[in-house]
Image (cartoon, coloured by chain):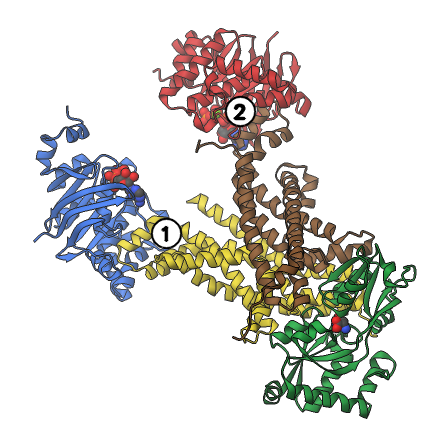
Chain colours: A yellow, B green, C blue, D red, E brown
Amino acid sequence: MIEFTIWDILRNLLLATRWTILLSLVSFLGGGLVGLVLLFLRISKRKSLRAVAKYYIELFQGTPLLMQLFIAFFGLGLFGIDVPAWLAAGLALILWSAAFLGEIWRGCVEAIAKGQWEASASLGMGRLQQMRYVILPQAMRIAVAPTVGFSVQVIKGTALTSIIGFVELSKAGTVVTNATFQPFTVYGLVALIYFALCWPLSKSSQILERKLNVAHRNH
Amino acid sequence: DALGDITARGTIRVAVPQDFPPFGSVGPDMAPVGYDIDMANLIAEKLGVKVELVPVTSANRIPYLQTNKVDLVISSLGKNPDREKVIDFTAAYAPFYNGVFAPADFVAAKPEELAGKTIGVTRGAVEDLELTKIAPADTVIKRYEDNNGTISAFLSGQVEAVATGNVVAAAILAKNPPKRPELKFLIKNSPCYIGLSKEQPALLEKVNGIIAAAKTDGSLNAIAQKWLGTGLPAEL
Amino acid sequence: MSLIAITDVRKSFGSNEVLKGINLDVEPGEVIAIIGKSGSGKSTLLRCINGLETISDGSISVAGAQLLDDEAHLKALRLKVGMIFQQFNLFPHLTVGGNVMLSQMVVKKTPKPEAEEMARKMLERVGLSQKFDAYPDQLSGGQQQRVAIARALAMQPIALLCDEITSALDPELVAEVLAVVRELAAEGMTLLMVTHEMRFARDVCSRVVFMHQGRVHEIGEPEAVFADPQTPELKQFLGVH
Amino acid sequence: MSLIAITDVRKSFGSNEVLKGINLDVEPGEVIAIIGKSGSGKSTLLRCINGLETISDGSISVAGAQLLDDEAHLKALRLKVGMIFQQFNLFPHLTVGGNVMLSQMVVKKTPKPEAEEMARKMLERVGLSQKFDAYPDQLSGGQQQRVAIARALAMQPIALLCDEITSALDPELVAEVLAVVRELAAEGMTLLMVTHEMRFARDVCSRVVFMHQGRVHEIGEPEAVFADPQTPELKQFLGVH
Amino acid sequence: MNYQFEFGWLVEYYPQIAKGIAITIQLIAVGAVAGISLGIVCAWVRALGPAWLKPVVAAYVELIRNTPFLIQLFFIFFGLPSLGLKLSELQAANIAMVVNLGAYSCEIIRAGIQATPKGQFEAGSSLAMTPFETFRHVVLIPSLERIWPALSSQVVIVMLGSAVVSQIAAEDLTFAANFIQSRTFRAFEAYMVSTAVYLLLAILLRQVLGTVGWLIFPKRAAG
Ligand SMILES: Nc1ncnc2c1ncn2[C@@H]1O[C@H](COP(=O)(O)OP(=O)(O)OP(=O)(O)O)[C@@H](O)[C@H]1O
Ligand SMILES: Nc1ncnc2c1ncn2[C@@H]1O[C@H](COP(=O)(O)OP(=O)(O)OP(=O)(O)O)[C@@H](O)[C@H]1O
Ligand SMILES: NC(=O)CC[C@H](N)C(=O)O
Ligand SMILES: [Mg+2]
Ligand SMILES: [Mg+2]
């Protein structure tokens, strides 16, 4: 049996981290797109559309991401859809992130004063134009901090894909543990790598938030 | 039909373990290696297609097949009536003796003596099903998601003993672990079969043919020698 | 034909009927002051005319076209009728120039150079041409309100609705906004304004509407209304005993 | 011996010296009004006496005991001297009764029945016995301030510091709070109050302290101070020319 | 699709599910009570506590909030024994829940404390209360009230996150679903049932937290 050196352990974990990063990007960007759609549904004038978005969000925020992963992975296959692990992982993470991002952004849109809607309406703008030119540019500013903050949750969420067999950082951790019998070292390193990915995002989210509050006070 | 799909695709998707030495584990480059991997390669080669190895755990091997994520499960898969209800099996291709393993100071020569003890097992494996049947009611059975969990639990002392295959225990032993799994007693002889979806006679027949040929031409024996350290037993 | 014809308009919020049958015809070039106690429905009436609230009953037509509650009709209406609010409601993320250009470009698809030219002209008209590149939060309240007027004017409406546009201003800034309105009135713009500035109403308006409990309670020329209120409610409102 | 002896007290915030050597002796039963322009250091002086600010130099003693900056001494001091603030600072999560009982129970370990008895007595004294179970946000500002007084009194202090306790009140509510203070003064409570109510200061206080730029600029009986200000600063402050 | 749904197994495996639900509820009960308590202590340290403790708490909070729960769980269950600290899977799961919720609620509660008007602290001081007494009797309850909705959401999130404790053989609701799946090969149905139960638990948990809030915070304004 070939021995793992500490460098082997670290190298393998770092290689697997690429997947963690890729998965995070996919679910964050995909989740952002779907979340945008949800946002529009959620603030739509049609009650039925609002209800759809509301129930979607309640469902995805009210059940464990782990279960969503299981169902995407083992469930969709039953309907004849071939779902490889990366697809199930990406899909579940996207749908899950979307629920949270949609809700975060709705809060930001609703934080924009009603007068902005009314003023733009009275200038003859349609709903999409109001969103595009008046509301979103303002909402985006306040959305940055919580959105960056949520990206940390996404990165941590990708750890769960290990359970459906996707070999990202966490799964690599368990596999390497089993090949080395050094759980303390391996999980310690895994935790450190996650920390190195997440902490800068957490910090910048906090800093952005503070900046924005200061900006508000100066008005 | 599965065989047609495989040839059309030019690739066969095979579920293999990566947490279950010597059938499947990873080297320092994280690539899967082991008995089952060699077996998968052999079959692909004989079918004249490329192989796509899909790492699975004991618990999700069968759902992988059920949900058509793989064409074959070559993952030290034992046969029992429950499994036969949902998937089909080829001929056996490897020996597998389930047993209870523990460090030297653990005393239990037969199932009854497991009373009050804590045994780790991988959920959904044959060992799990068998142990659940034969162990006394007050045996504490801890069922882990995959073999990584079971082995980690044993090595970190979270369970006193594990139920697994004899060669598995031997492979762990070979790596000089902090806790040495020694055989206490055997539970069951449950050789490994290749699993495939129900009602795929063409594929079944084809794979059975390959296994039979490999047995006669000695290539299967070579794989056994390489990973188990002995040749194939006579009963196979 | 009246420019704005309001016929039997009713508006309820839930079970609370806020407008109880309003009739009012506004001729082109008229300047109408709407006065009345808080809660009497003044703002609601203006908001109905601009389609910000949908009416429960009755009809409103502007320049002959009926006000209907779909996006196309609403847009057509709002191109004809501008509105200015108590809280200015400038777009904080755009410069003064951007505020005045935005709806021209977005709604009317005016090309940018023309929109800019129009914006400069309108800012000139309200005396703020030098503030083109400033942001709203760099302006005083009076300046912001004048930008809001320029923004509405840039759409070239045929009438302007003003809802207490000086109420959020410090007293020393009120005059500069009223001066702009006075000029608009002199130039013949049709104006409907809710106001608490009685002196201004008396000087500038052609008619005064006194609203009370969701109804037009008294209406007439300012001299008549202010000098000789007919109803006890108006008397009380004006503090005449 | 003076009840409160303030000797050469100095206090700086950073490089900004806010109190520049204050000397003041308060005898038992005295009612002292502190007046002065905004920023002259009135609040800071009271806060120093109560230990909410640590003094930079000089000394303060209350009933013979020196004010030192450690928890035990501070606690002893605060048991002797109560303080009431402009913003009432009632505890919003406790009922009126709870507000008055809390510190007795927590600080003095008074058993609940006795604390309650005391609370009822003090609320009676400020005319609010019927509000025992109300929450602060169900009371008017004047009532809240009277609860704050009752809360301070329940600790049985030998002196009370009041920092503009009527400034946050609507004019019609000021009188009810001052009536309570007037009674306290009549009963012999030692009072130090920062106030803008000159009439009240003149009627009730035994001495008036005029602070200016961190110093006691003038001090004397109210008749003297108000009728015959000596310094141009006090003249200006009182509007006498 | 040609898949036949089949829920017959529910009859046989219902005790497993019930046990799983009980364990999930136990986890969140301990997690919420001990986690919020820990959060209060940590929030006190970060907002008002001794200077030397602040960086310790800050490090704890940042470490936990920036690593996955699953890894924390593995570290506690598989890693700590090599330092001689061996915990049962339920102990490990409970500790992970408490440690996790402690870190999150620390930050939430701290925001609540920092939003306390200065006058409340001063009023406490001038009534001769020590800083700690002021915190305990004056500041804490209104601070919790301010952030109760955010805290409730976090408790629900952590409850849903607890699904991964099945990975260390803690027999919670997810374990039950996995167990059933490995015996009946009815993966889809098993996960659907447990997902529905989680949804129900989440809704219930919100109600319970709302009631708890209603009980500990004064019912004013409305009354
Ligand atoms: N969006 C709304 N929903 C429910 N009720 C409303 C709404 N807008 C206004 N009202 C009610 O309608 C009535 C009239 O309000 P409106 O704003 O028109 O009064 P107003 O005459 O403009 O008063 P003010 O001088 O205070 O601005 C009030 O009783 C108000 O509470
Ligand atoms: N915490 C503080 N930090 C820095 N400077 C302070 C602080 N508190 C007060 N000051 C400064 O000390 C000076 C005196 O303030 P103080 O509050 O004592 O005045 P005051 O006489 O009570 O005025 P007012 O009538 O406005 O209440 C002011 O210049 C103020 O800016
Ligand atoms: N990978 C495994 O866990 C195999 C164990 C056993 N042979 C089974 O089929 O369940
Ligand atoms: Mg109004
Ligand atoms: Mg002051």
Residue with the mark numbered 1: C92
Spot occupied by residue D136 in the image (x, y as percentages of width and height): 47, 27
* Amino acid type indicated by mark 2: Thr
Spot occupied by residue D128 in the image (x, y as percentages of width and height): 46, 17
* Element assignment for label 1: loop
* Foreground of the two, E64 or B160: B160
Residue with the mark numbered 2: D44
* Foreground of the two, A200 or C163: C163
The correct choice, above or below, for C77 with respect to D30 in the image is below
* Amino acid type indicated by mark 1: Pro
* Foreground of the two, C225 or C47: C47
Residues beneath discs 1 and 2 located on the same chain: no
Spot occupied by residue A95 in the image (x, y as percentages of width and height): 52, 64
The correct choice, above or below, for D21 with respect to E195 in the image is above
Asked whether mark 2 lies closer than 8 Å to ligand 2, one says yes
What residue is at 60 percent from the left and 45 percent from the top? Answer: E105
What residue is at 69 percent from the left and 76 percent from the top? Answer: B84
Q: Is residue E147 visible?
A: yes
| Chain letter behind tag 1 | C
